[in-house]
Amino acid sequence: MNHDTGPTPSPSAPSPSAHSPTPATEQATAAPPSAPTPFERLGGERGVRQLVDRFYDLMDLQPAYAGIRRLHPTTLEGSRDKLYWFLCGWLGGPNHYIERFGHPRLRARHLPYAIAIAERDQWMACMMSAMQEEGVEAALAERLAQAFFGTADWMRNR
């Protein structure tokens, strides 16, 4: 998936529609409000940046992810930043993406890219590998995988 764009669910508010991705703070934790957010559990901005960087490093280097790599610009810096900004807010941290661009409109921003089951599955496999390599705790990784899958599946347009 190209993360140069996307809908922005607010971690503290309900999703704007039934088809918008639910923030990870709602999907990835079933804990009381005083429990750490997924953002905090990942290590804050530094942890989210490391996860995003590993995700794009894998996408750039591994032939298994060539299909989704082709959907991205030649250089991945902009995609890295936009996914990082988006995930910070989606995971319960600062709303960097919304502050810069407003509502992410993920589906609308991904419509120009042919995203089918193969691309969804490559994106998921790449993110799962990145989470594993970054040492994301198993329970959190599983909950995030469920949330990511819902969003990745919603991006399909083919």
Image: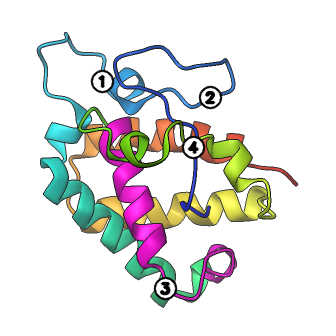
Query: Mark 4 vs mark 3: which is more N-terminal?
Result: 3
Q: Residue at x 18, y 52 (%)?
A: 45
Residue for badge 2: 20
Residue 28 in the image, given as x and y percentages of width and height = 35, 29
Query: Mark 2 vs mark 4: which is more N-terminal?
Result: 2
In this view, 2 is above or below 75: above
In this view, 153 is above or below 66: above
Q: Which contiguous range is marked in magenta?
A: 66-90
- Between 78 and 102, the one lying in front of the other is 102
Alpha carbon separation for disc pair 2 and 4: 13 Å
Tag of residue 61:
none
Residue 23 lies in what quarter of the image? top left
Residue for badge 1: 29
At label 1, counting other C-alpha atoms closer than 10 Å, the crowd grade (few under 14, some 14-19, many 20 or more) is some
Alpha carbon separation for disc pair 4 and 1: 16 Å
> SS for tag 4?
helix
User: Which amino acid type is marked by label 1?
Assistant: Thr
